C-alpha cells in the first residue's frame, strides 16, 4: 500500500506563488503520481500528473504555463510549483498515486490553497 502526505498549502494574494509537496511511503511500486483539486459541490479534477520517468506530464489547460509538476522517483516525492495564482485556483489539493500492477489509486489527506483577490 501507499501513504501520501502533502504539505505547502496556504493563503496567498492573486498573482502569488506556492509550492505543494507530497511524500509517498509504503511497500508498493508507484506508477503515476499527480495532483487533483476539489471545491465544495464540484467533482475532483486533475490538475497535473507525471509518469515515473518524468518524461510524460499532463497539466490541465487552465493551469498550463502557470503550474509545473516535478517528480523525484528515487525520493518518492512529487511537487507542484504554482505561480500567478488566481482566485479560481482556490481549492483543496490532493496528492494522488497509483500502484503497479493493480493500478489501485491512493489519495493524500488534502491541503487547502486559498487565493485572495
Image (cartoon, helix red, strand yellow):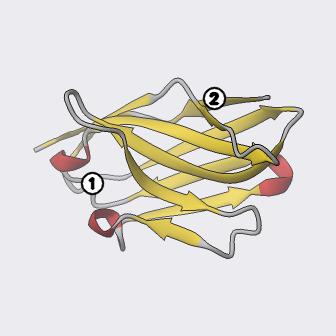
Q: Quadrant of residue 98?
A: top right
Can you tell which quarter of the image residue 67 is in?
bottom left
Q: Outermost residue toward the top?
A: 109
Q: Is residue 76 above or below residue 83?
A: above
Residue, x 35% and y 60% (percent of image)? 83
Mark 2 Cα shell of 10 Å, populated few (<14), some (14-19), many (≥20): some
Left of 86 or right of it: where is 101? Answer: right
Q: Secondary structure at mark 1?
A: loop
* Among numbered discs 1 and 2, the one appearing first in the sequence: 2
User: Alpha-carbon neighbours of circle 1 within 10 Å: few (<14), some, or many (≥20)?
Assistant: many
Q: How many marks?
A: 2
Tell me: 2 left or right of 114. right
Look at the image and tell me whether residue 82 can be seen. Answer: yes
Residue extending farthest to the front is: 102
Q: Would residue 64 appear left or right of 69 to someone viewing this image? A: left
Q: Is residue 11 visible?
A: no
Q: Nearer the viewer, mark 1 or mark 2?
A: 2
Looking at the rendered image, the quarter that the C terminus falls into is top left
Image coords of residue 13 (percent x, y): 21, 44
**Pointers 1 and 2 in contact (CB under 8 A)?**
no
Residue that numbered label 1 is attached to: 85
**Which residue bears the numbered disc 2?**
5
Residue at 29% across, 52% down: 16
- State whether residue 14 is above or below residue 56: above
Amino acid at each position: 500500500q501507499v501513504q501520501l502526505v502533502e504539505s505547502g498549502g496556504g493563503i496567498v494574494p492573486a498573482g502569488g506563488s506556492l509550492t505543494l509537496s507530497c511524500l509517498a511511503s509504503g511497500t508498493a511500486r508507484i506508477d503515476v503520481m499527480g495532483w487533483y483539486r476539489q471545491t465544495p459541490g464540484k467533482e475532483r479534477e486533475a490538475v497535473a500528473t507525471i509518469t515515473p520517468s518524468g518524461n510524460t506530464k499532463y497539466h490541465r489547460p487552465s493551469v498550463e504555463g502557470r503550474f509545473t509538476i516535478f517528480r523525484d522517483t528515487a525520493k518518492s516525492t512529487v511537487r507542484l510549483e504554482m505561480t500567478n495564482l488566481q482566485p479560481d485556483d482556490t481549492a483543496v489539493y490532493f496528492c494522488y498515486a497509483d500502484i503497479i500492477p493493480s493500478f489501485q489509486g491512493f489519495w493524500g489527506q488534502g491541503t487547502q490553497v486559498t487565493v485572495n483577490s
